[in-house]
Structure formats: C-alpha cells, structure tokens
Image (cartoon, grey):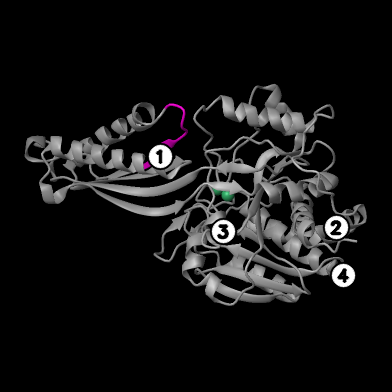
C-alpha cells in the first residue's frame, strides 16, 4: 500500500497528521462507534505478556526479513520462513498458492473462522536509512539482472506481526474457540498477489471459509497510535500500459517518421485534463504516469513508446470514465499524427483492485478491545480515506466476507512531533528510501493483531 494521498495534496496529509497529533494528545476525545464490551482486561494482560516474551524472537525475524527483501512473486525465502514458523507452532500449512502464498490453519474448537493476512513483497528502491539492519545487497532476478530492493512499505513488519499473532494465539489457546487462518500473500505492490492466490484455487482447497478477515499495515504515524476506521478507507486502482506505434527513422528526417515519443508526450499532457476537466470536481481520482519508455539513441526516432499508468478511483463509474477518456486521447493523438488504422495505440490492463471498505459492524466490534489495549484516545476511528490502495480485499470479493484493515503507527513519536513542528504531516513516507519501522512497533503490531482476532474468537463468560 502506498499513500498517494488524495485530491488535495496538501490538506489531506495535514488532516491525517492532525488526527495522529490529536490521538497522541491526552486531551483528545476520540469517539468509538460502538458500545460493544471489550474483551476482559485479563485477556489483554495475557496478550501483553505473551508478546513481551516473544519480542526478542520477533525482532530478530523482522531484522532478518528486512535485510532480505524480495520483490513481487519472488518471495520464496520469506514464504519459507513463514511456513517453517507456522509449522513449528502446529498450524497446518499449505505453500505455493499463487506462486509464493502460504496459508496456515489452526483449528481450536467450535466457533467462527477468522482469516488474517500479511503481504510479503518489497519495493525496488535503494535503501537510505543507514540502519544497522538496512538492506544493502541487490536482488538478482531470473533474467540475471540486478535491482535495488528494500522493504519500504513495511511488509516485513506485517509478516513479523502475523507470526507474533500466530504464536500468541497458540500460547492463549485455552482462552479462545474457533479457527484461526493466517496467510502470507505475495505481490501486493503490483496489485496481483491476492488475485493470484484466488486464481490458484484459494477457495477450492478445502480451507475453512472466513467469517471475518483482517489485515494490518504500517503508517508513518507515531508508534502507539493506530487507526481502525469504518467505511471506505482506500481507493480502487488499476495499473495499465499504453503502447504507441509509430514509424521509426533517422533523427534528422522526422518528416519520414511518425514519432511515438511526441505522441507519448502529447498523451501525458492530455491525460492531465481527465481529472481536471472530465470528472465531476467533487469526485476523487488520480491518474499518474510512472514511466515513459521509448528509444535508446540520441539520433534515432524509435518505433514505439510505452507509458505506464496508475489510476485511483472510488467508484466503477469513475474508473470507466477514466479508461474511456484514456482510449479517446490515445486514439485522438494517434489519428492526429497520421498513424494507420491497424496500428492504433494499445492498452494492456495489469493489476487491479477495488476500493477497500472496512465493515462498520466489525470495526465497532474490535475497537473497544483495541482501545483497551492501546489506551484511551490511541485508536483513531475517523482516519480520512486515502488514495492509497490495497489488494487485501480482493481475496474476499467472491465471498463477501466482512473485513477490517488496521493502520499501525511505526514512526518514533519524537520524529513525528518534530515533523509536525516543521509543518510536515509525517516524518517520512511509505515507499521512500528513508522509510523505516521503529522496533518499538514490532510488539505493538503483534498485539493489535491478537486483540483483533480475540475480539471475535475469545471465549466470553
Ligand atoms: Zn506499498
Ligand atoms: Zn504496503
């Protein structure tokens, strides 16, 4: 997930920052949506004790995962660690779902089935944190090429939290009843991992079907503050490639060519009018061109150019309107350039995910327990929706499972306060080379996971 923050690039992050500030202030009153009783304090105390005892192991796992990042669909080392740890805890483990996905099932008597997800993949970024456990090696891909690689979105923390949840629930087996399924998903960053697991028959393998599903994600808010908010949380997204076909030639004789570089440039500028001039100004959407690839030499006009686009939207209608306008602009640019009818631009649809919408009743059910764990005012339940995206929910689309996706602050509070004093919403961002997870957030994420699961599975007196 990344925080391509909404429509208003300045105001929303500030709002988010202010909410995190509010949550860190003792005076703040954060209202929770429900009157559901939290799980007993004795259970929260047991979670605290279990995770505290496990923290040295979890910290070691986290540092190891951080030093060995793996990009989308290559997470074999990470998946092997997940499988090994879950097997050691007594989970029934299935590996290799959607290439590298791992599912672990722990049946513990009658009751609901809860699925809990962590994503495993990293980003292609050169790490600049300078931390002792920073990733320094490049990753060699199957084609022999080497790329920079870094966990800049905290998926290493997500995996660690998942293993912390698994251990805690095993230690506390006498306190709950039902089925816990924990799973590690590949390739979130390219928006294809959840889909890959579903296409690899995730729901036809006989796993207990989820009554509820959870996921947790890092956010560079202060350690000790989380967001568990109902309703629409994140935008839907598409990744697509546009190819312009031209006629190549010598750079000195452009009149004998149809220049795909010029077509690409025209298209990029025209795309900017889709959000600003075609969509209702009251809707939120983003269209970003993340890559333009064309040619190699200074004096050669290439045959083709490829644009890599990313869309963010909240409704299928807006998505359709954006795709339609992209096609119209592409064809218009090509026709104006004199491209032949059989060489019109092509659009390749790649990763796709719908908006992430937290179930209101489920959020209302877990939040009192989460507040009991975190402390009064440390659970934000009004975090604004962001243009960031997730594919977590795609796994449950066909089942209509109610789910909740929780954001966990991972920045040192003093850094967060300093950033706020300087007028910045966060000290750093996901996907930046300086992104890092404060080690203090490692036990917190594990506890948040366990308390969310226990809100559903705990034996109630
Ligand atoms: Zn990300
Ligand atoms: Zn992410």
Question: What mark, if any, has residue 318 been given in the picture?
Answer: 1
Outermost residue on the left side: it is 256
Residue 285 is situated, as x and y percent measured from the top left of the image, at: 45, 35
Q: Which residue is mark 2?
A: 47
Nearer the N terminus, badge 3 or badge 4? Answer: 4
N-terminal of the pair, mark 4 or mark 1, is 4
Distance from disc 2 to disc 4, alpha carbons, whole Å, reads: 13 Å
Q: Is 91 displayed left or right of 281 in the figure?
A: right
Q: Residue at x 93, y 56 (%)?
A: 42
288 part of magenta stretch: yes
In the shown orientation, is residue 283 left or right of residue 213?
left
- Which residue lies under the disc numbered 4? 174
- Depth-wise, is mark 3 or mark 4 nearer the camera? 3
Calculate the distance from the C-alpha at mark 3 to the C-alpha at mark 1.
22 Å
- Residue 88 seen in the figure: yes
Of label 3 and label 1, which has the lower sequence position?
1
Q: Which residue is mark 3?
A: 400
**Secondary structure under the numbered disc 4 in the rendered image:** helix
Q: Was residue 424 drawn as part of the magenta stretch in this picture? A: no
Magenta span:
281-291
């Amino acid at each position: 997930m990344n925080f391509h923050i909404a429509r208003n690039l300045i105001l929303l992050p500030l709002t988010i920052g202010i909410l995190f500030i509010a949550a860190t202030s003792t005076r703040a009153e954060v209202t929770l949506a429900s009157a559901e009783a939290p799980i007993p304090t004795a259970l929260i105390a047991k979670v605290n004790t279990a995770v505290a005892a496990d923290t040295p192991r979890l910290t070691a796992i986290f540092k190891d995962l951080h030093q060995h990042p793996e990009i989308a669909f290559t997470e074999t080392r990470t998946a092997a660690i997940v499988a090994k740890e879950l097997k050691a805890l007594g989970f029934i483990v299935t590996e290799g779902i959607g290439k590298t996905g791992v599912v672990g099932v722990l049946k513990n008597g009658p009751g609901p089935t809860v699925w809990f997800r962590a994503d495993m993949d990293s980003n292609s970024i050169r790490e600049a944190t300078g931390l002792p456990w920073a990733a320094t090696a490049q990753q060699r891909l199957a084609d022999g090429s080497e790329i920079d690689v870094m966990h800049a979105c905290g998926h290493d923390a997500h995996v660690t939290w998942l293993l912390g949840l698994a251990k805690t629930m095993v230690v506390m087996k006498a306190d709950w009843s039902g089925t816990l399924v924990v799973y590690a998903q590949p390739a979130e960053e390219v928006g294809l991992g959840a889909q890959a697991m579903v296409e690899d028959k995730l729901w036809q393998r006989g796993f207990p079907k989820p009554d509820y599903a959870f996921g947790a994600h890092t956010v560079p808010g202060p350690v000790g503050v989380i967001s568990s908010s109902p309703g629409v949380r994140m935008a839907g997204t598409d990744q697509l490639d546009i190819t312009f076909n031209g006629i190549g030639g010598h750079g000195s004789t452009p009149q004998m060519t149809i220049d795909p570089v010029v077509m690409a440039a025209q298209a990029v500028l025209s795309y900017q009018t889709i959000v600003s001039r075609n969509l209702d100004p009251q809707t939120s959407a983003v269209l970003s061109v993340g890559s333009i690839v064309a040619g190699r030499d200074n004096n050669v006009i290439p045959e083709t150019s490829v644009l890599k686009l990313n869309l963010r939207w909240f409704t299928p209608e807006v998505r359709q309107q954006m795709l339609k306008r992209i096609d119209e602009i592409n064809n218009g640019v090509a026709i104006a350039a004199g491209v032949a009818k059989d060489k019109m631009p092509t659009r390749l649809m790649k990763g796709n995910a719908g908006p992430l919408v937290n179930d209101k009743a489920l959020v209302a059910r877990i939040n009192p327990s989460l507040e009991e764990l975190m402390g009064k005012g440390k659970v934000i339940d009004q975090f604004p929706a962001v243009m960031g995206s997730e594919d977590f929910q795609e796994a449950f689309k066909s089942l209509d499972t109610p789910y909740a996706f929780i954001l966990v602050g991972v920045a040192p509070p003093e850094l967060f306060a300093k950033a706020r004093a300087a007028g910045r919403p966060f000290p750093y961002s996901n996907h930046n080379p300086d992104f890092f997870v404060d080690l203090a957030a490692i036990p917190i994420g594990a506890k948040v996971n366990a308390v969310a699961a226990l809100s559903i599975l705990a034996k109630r007196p």
